[in-house]
Image (cartoon, helix red, strand yellow):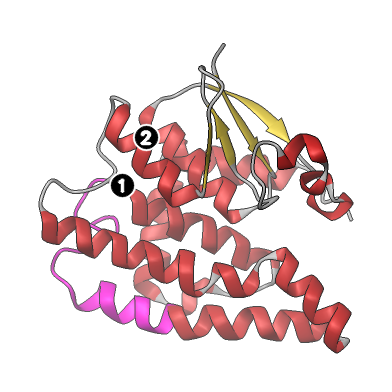
Amino acid sequence: MTMRLHNFFRSSTSIRLRAALNLKGISYEYVSYKLSSGETRLPNFLAKNPAGLVPVLELENGEFLVQSLSIIEWLDETQPGPSLLPDDACGRARVRALSYMIACEIHPLNNLRVLNRLKAQFGADVMAQERWFMHWVEVTFNALEEMLNRDSQTGRYCHLDQPGLADCCLYAQVLNNKRFGLDTSRWPTIWRIFTSLDSLPAFNELRRCLNRTPIKP
């Protein structure tokens, strides 16, 4: 059996992991869940990840790996193909910092369960949820833009000229921004890196898949 990726097509955490799998050239079985229907809260999924969150990577031996950044680092440590982290310790720290800014400072505040909680507890309508989403993207993207723009280690991609962990996170977040109508071209360095990534099959396949997949309520 090949690896199985348990995911949701629009989830930025799932997209970043799929980008990493593509960069590594790893084939996998795609298993989709509908988050709004609570499919990841059912016993069958909770047996894979008690947190009820995607993605989950099911290995050939039946083990389940959770948390997208952890899985991506596992891929880099165990699978052949282009490295997703630099060889030097300072480079790795820089790439992790850029990745964590997106994965830890934007995503936890803007994921579906938080937006749903805002609606249920505080009566936030769609426009209020969009303002919430945009605020937290803007706060972090302002800082991320400056960090990328002023650092000589920023190349064609987030770190020099080979796409890696930070690029997987950035690409997925920009795609998610589009869903809320946020114009990422306001941050020219981030936008330049995104368009460079979008020229690569490992990434633009994800955008094409997202665009042709019906958005279900």
Residue 129 locus on image (x, y percent): 76, 80
Amino acid at the residue labelled 2: Leu
Counting from the top left corner in percent of width and height, residue 121 is at 85, 83
Q: Relative to 166, does residue 105 appear above or below in the rendering?
A: below
Disc ID at residue 75? 2
Position of 217 compared to 53: left or right? right
Closer to the eye: label 1 or 2: 2
* Up-down relation of residue 157 to residue 190 (above or below): above
Neighbours of disc 1 within 10 Å: few (<14), some (14-19), many (20+): many
Label 1, on which residue? 163
Q: Left or right? Give the position of 211 relative to 138.
A: right
Circle 1 sits in a helix, a strand or a loop, which is it?
loop
**Over which residues does the magenta segment extend?**
141-162
- The question of residue 115 being in magenta is answered with no
In the image, residue 208 lies at what x, y percent? 62, 42
Q: Earlier in the sequence, mark 1 or mark 2?
A: 2
